[in-house]
Image: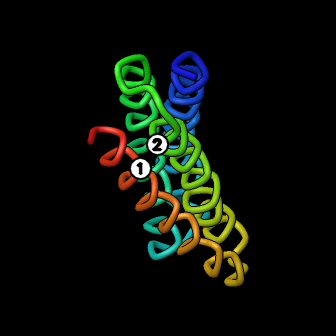
Amino acid sequence: MDRTFLLAGAVAGLIAVGFGAFGAHGLRERLTPDMLAVFETGVRYHMYHALALLLTAALAPRLPGKAIVAAGWLFVAGITLFSGSLYVLAVTGVRIFGAITPIGGVAFLAGWAALAIAAL
């Protein structure tokens, strides 16, 4: 799993940097300041959790068990649901996507809890 989470973290980081640049240069003139802030929040949490995936990959060989694996997959789910829903909300303005965001936030919290359990 360590290679899987290393790959996921690297790809997530790549996408986060790309989306950050896209938001800063391609969306600044197209989105309202409020929607640009929503997009930037998605990018920020995306990058934080790309780094969390890299940490999970680094720790996986030292912390065998289900908790470390759960942490990695929960971080992936959180990036997809939290950041993904914010990206779509910001670009489309369709507010229903905001209802998905808290599910991603819970996935992030559960991922950090699973990482803590793995450490125990």
Q: Nearer the viewer, residue 41 or 120?
A: 120
Numbered disc total: 2
Q: Secondary structure at mark 2?
A: helix
| Residue 87 in the image: above or below residue 94 | above
The dot on residue 67 is 2
The reply, left or right, for residue 8 in relation to residue 108 is right
| Residue 86 in the image: above or below residue 66 | below
* Residue position marked by numbered label 1 in the rendering: 114
The crowd level at tag 2 (other Cα within 10 Å; few <14, some 14-19, many 20+) is: many
Q: Position of residue 67 (x, y in %)?
A: 46, 42
- Residues marked 1 and 2 touching at CB (< 8 Å): yes
Spatial CA distance of label 1 from label 2 is 5 Å
Q: Nearer the viewer, residue 113 or 83?
A: 113
The dot on residue 66 is none
Write the residue at 51% across / 57% down.
28
Say which quadrant the N terminus sits in: top right
Q: Mark 2 is on which residue type?
A: Ala
Write the residue at 51% across / 29% down.
9
Q: Mark 1 is on which residue type?
A: Ala
Q: Nearer the viewer, residue 108 or 115?
A: 115
Write the residue at 63% across / 52% down.
80
| Residue 43 in the image: above or below residue 47 | below
Q: Nearer the viewer, residue 116 or 73?
A: 116
Q: Residue furthest left?
A: 120
